[in-house]
Image (cartoon, grey):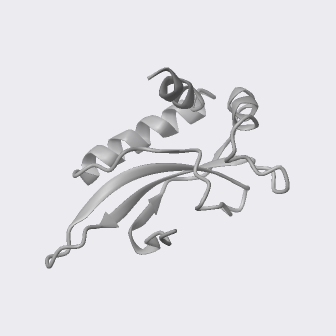
């Protein structure tokens, strides 16, 4: 598995996981019972394309973490598809922050299952 590029990893402030989101998180493989998660870490990640000129695609990833920001990069709760625009990725990250503050971040996983 490819190690993430933390040079182009822009995380938002940690957000406590709400009760409803925690119930859903417990059902997914991204939940680690040995290291219970208390917060969401939402980040915009750059993925460098293999081209002569440095060029990136961007994605938004959501990781369960502890209150100190420790997380398992191999087990994201959710990742968006790659996108060309960092501005779009930032806007999506902001919408995920809003959902998490409303204890509704888990609805993106439910919507993904329906699609």
**Front residue of 86 and 24:** 24
**Front residue of 22 and 27:** 27
Please determine whether, in this image, residue 105 is positioned above or below residue 93: above
User: Residue 82: x percent and y percent?
Assistant: 32, 50
Please determine whether, in this image, residue 12 is positioned above or below residue 51: above
The residue at 14%/79% (across/down) is: 52
The residue at 32%/55% (across/down) is: 58
Q: Quadrant of the C terminus?
A: top left
The residue at 59%/26% (across/down) is: 104
User: Residue 57: x percent and y percent?
Assistant: 27, 58
User: Residue 56: x percent and y percent?
Assistant: 25, 64
Q: Quadrant of residue 105?
A: top right
Question: Which residue of the protein is positioned furthest toward the left in this rendering?
Answer: 53
The residue at 58%/35% (across/down) is: 100
- The tally of labels here is 0
Question: Which residue of the protein is positioned furthest toward the top in this rendering?
Answer: 114
Please determine whether, in this image, residue 73 is positioned above or below residue 83: below
């Amino acid at each position: 598995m490819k190690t993430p590029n933390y040079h182009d990893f822009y995380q938002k402030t940690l957000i406590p996981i709400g009760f409803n989101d925690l119930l859903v998180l417990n059902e997914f493989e991204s939940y680690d019972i040995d290291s219970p998660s208390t917060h969401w870490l939402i980040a915009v990640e750059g993925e460098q394309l293999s081209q002569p000129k440095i060029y990136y695609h961007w994605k938004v990833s959501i990781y369960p973490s502890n209150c100190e920001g420790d997380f398992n990069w191999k087990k994201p709760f959710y990742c968006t598809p790659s996108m060309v625009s960092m501005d779009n990725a930032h806007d999506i990250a902001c919408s995920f922050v809003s959902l998490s503050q409303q204890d509704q971040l888990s609805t993106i996983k439910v919507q993904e299952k329906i699609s």
